[in-house]
Image: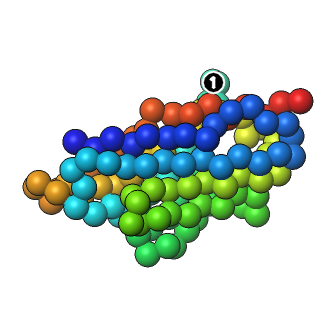
Amino acid sequence: QVQLVESGGGLVQPGGSLRLSCAASGSIFSINAMGWYRQAPGKQRELVAAITSRGSTNYADSVKGRFTISRDNAKNTVYLQMNSLKPEDTAVYYCRADVRDQGNFRSYAYWGQGTQVTVSS
């Protein structure tokens, strides 16, 4: 089993910044893609940003130029730096990791528990 633990959410004013972290632990042989998703009330969960093990990234159009995803492979951790936050960024943010299991070498997708980000004055 693998656990993903997120941190860094909170309340911030419009134009402010937050940094989310997500650390993976457990039966990990390797981690392929890692990403951040978000879900606002009454809306479907959507991809915010993703990063491969080699560092290739992609972003939702709505966050390009404002958010930056990065990862530390040695720590099995992914980060999301969020700048110039807007009220429409308010959502629960979830991290996801595609993990190759150390025991059977099969790949599984794991999700974090979610962290609330609220952008409001």
Q: How is the image coloured?
A: rainbow
Task: Give the residue type at disc 1.
Answer: Gly
**What residue appears at the point 17 percent right and 57 percent down from the top-left corner?**
102
**What residue appears at the point 28 percent right and 63 percent down from the top-left corner?**
30
Residue 35 visible to the viewer: yes
Residue 90: x, y in percent? 72, 34
Residue 109: x, y in percent? 32, 48
Q: Secondary structure at mark 1?
A: loop
In the rendered image of this protein, does residue 75 appear above or below residue 109? below
Q: Is residue 53 left or right of residue 85?
A: left
Viewer-side residue, 109 vs 27: 27
Residue 78: x, y in percent? 49, 56
Residue 112 sits in quarter: top left
The N terminus lies in which quarter of the figure?
top left
The C terminus lies in which quarter of the figure?
top right
**Residue at image mark 1:** 42
**Callout 1: 10 Å neighbours few (<14), some, many (20+)?**
few
**What residue appears at the point 39 percent right and 43 percent down from the top-left corner?**
4
Residue 92 sits in quarter: top right
